[in-house]
Amino acid sequence: MREITYAQAIKEALAEEMRCDENVVVLGEDVGILGGNFRATAGLYQEFGEKRVLDTPISESGIIGCAVGLAMAGFRPVAELMFGDFVCTAMDQIVNQAAKIRYMSGGKLSVPLVIRTNIGAGRSSAAQHSQSLHAWFCHTPGLKVIMPSSPYEVKGLLKSAIRDEDPVMIFEHKGMYNKKGEVPEEEYTISIGNADIKREGKDVTIIATSSMVKESMIVADRLKEEDIKVEVIDLRTLVPMDKTTIINSVKKTGRLVIVDEGVKQAGITAEIAVMVTEEVFDFLDGPIERVANENTPIPFSPPLEEFVRPTQEKIYQAVKKILK
Amino acid sequence: MKLSKEKLVEMLRKMLEIRCFEEAIYYVYAQGWMPGLAHLYIGQEAIAVGVCENLKKDDYITSTHRGHGHLIAKGGDLNKMMAEVMGKVTGYCKGKGGSMHIAAPELGIMGANGIVGGSIPIATGLGLSSKLEKDSRVTICFFGEGASNQGAFHEGLNMGSLWKLPIVYVCENNLYAISVSQQRSQNIEDVATRAKAYGIPGEIVDGNDVLAVYEVAQKAINHAREGKGSTLIECKTYRWGGHHVGDPGTAYRPPKEVKLWKDKCPIKGFKFSLIKRKILTQTEIDNIENEIKQRVDKAIEFARKSSYPAPEEALDDIFAK
């Protein structure tokens, strides 16, 4: 199968949806002439023109508000927030407006809006360009939250997000934009709300998000050599969460490690862990392990940054610990 | 400006409807028939009416926490509004929004808003949709002088002016943001002067003079519809009551000031001029008022007799089905 980068997969998804639905428009900082800070919108401005690919001022609140208004008026805007950290300057429009308009209006208004942004440290970008803030939005009913782990996932999920009738936040990964993966030539979508079992195993379940899926797969390979069979689940969608896949896996393995790049405190790992104890506590053979970022801002210097991030070694140790 | 008798009577009728509805809301609140609070529009009626009388049904408005007047002026149904304020299932939003969140897209009412300034960036998107669709709709974005101090105001007006969007920004300067007076919250006397920063026209109008508001709004709306871009209109006005029904509004405003503005009542002045111009007689006005009073009473009755939503309906409308 052909291989393309994560950024190219995003661009393909956008271009395909824009070709088949003229209500799809893209807006954000530098998404037009430049083709996006991470080149995920490269070529769209040239193909679709300035009316459908809008370079905006540096006004995150203005961008999301504009997208909300467009969506209410029947468009399907895809707004880009260049770095996930910049959600903070758009928070009212995301949390108080986009997420609640359908509900507050008793279902009369729809906001079919996609917000593309990203997570991920590991680039020495320091504390304001490295955060993984996806968990915040799981705490806001009315938003769907997806975290694609590969070029294949990002293309299929983004296409579904654009077709969705509700606001969807898609957290891409900065470290993956340039990474290649297999993506079919023919059209496909991946439905929102379904986790994917990337590898089956009977001894321990690892649930991972975003780039942590690949890290977990590498760890699973290493553990296989020790005759430990790891089941790796790519969560893919945080809201709505695919509880069934998680529960069935835990029932099978009895042991669970959850891996996510957000900070550990009140993170998505905590939510999953509690859900599992509520649903299938009796099937657990030991405590749940969580591998997440330390409860710190992201530091600049490489050894500091490496220290706080979830790594293959930390995932490996977590699995070994619960198998003791 | 020459307006037909019908238009003038309709403007008075709408202002009276707003006044009567808002007085009824206070009554309903005092009786304990409504949950929560509401922010009354009394004193500002000329603005909503003067602006909305220029609009077509499919033009958009975005409203604020003090939104009842805008909704009535845009054609909102009194029964559904009253029911929503009382949290009933027959309300505009099935009781899920309440006073601050009434939406009626079928009338171009794209939502009141509980966040001060929250609707200004949203108006950008509505305006942009009209520009992209070439549907010749205009978006009216209502907000107060308090909202003009939000970052959202700057971002919204910068983008709206940059893209020459068909938006009329209507700032209702009622001199107080809850308890903080305008002079204690911004270093300018006229919000309209901020228009200069965005390269769009800024107009100042007596917000208690419905005909003056109508005229200024008409010019701005035509300007927008012709593709010439946005305008910022500042309407000087005053809210008669406190910030909401539970606030007497006496702790931070001198009684003399309140009286001065009540003397400038937008309805009293307009009635007087219509009688003087022999458009209406006092008796005819009394008849209109009685008819409105009856409709508002019926709205209260409708709302009181309506059911509350079933509790489990709280779980619906989070996402599309």
Image (tube, coloured by chain):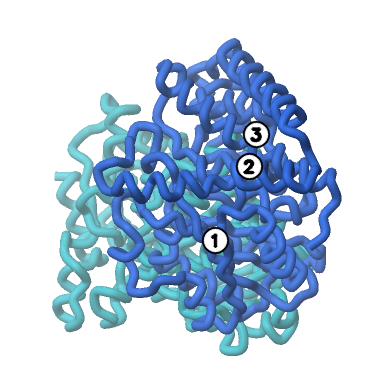
> Which residue is tagged 3?
B17
Write down the quadrant of residue B305 in the picture.
top right
Q: Nearer the viewer, residue A145 or A203?
A: A145
Residue B24 appears left or right of B137? left
The chain containing the residue under callout 3 comes to B
> Which residue is tagged 1?
B235
In the picture shown, does residue B200 fall above or below A61? below
Q: Earlier in the sequence, mark 3 or mark 1?
A: 3
Q: Nearer the viewer, residue A267 or B153?
A: B153
Percent of width and height locating residue B15: 64, 41
* Res. A282 visible in picture: yes
Are labels 1 and 2 assigned to the same chain? yes
Are labels 2 and 3 assigned to the same chain? yes
In the picture shown, does residue A289 fall above or below A67? above
Residue A291 appears left or right of B215? left
> Which residue is tagged 2?
B71
The chain containing the residue under callout 1 comes to B
Work out which residue is located at the far top of the displayed protein and give it: B305
Point 29% across, 41% down: residue: B250
Callout 3: helix, strand or loop?
helix
Q: Chain B is drawn in which colour?
A: blue
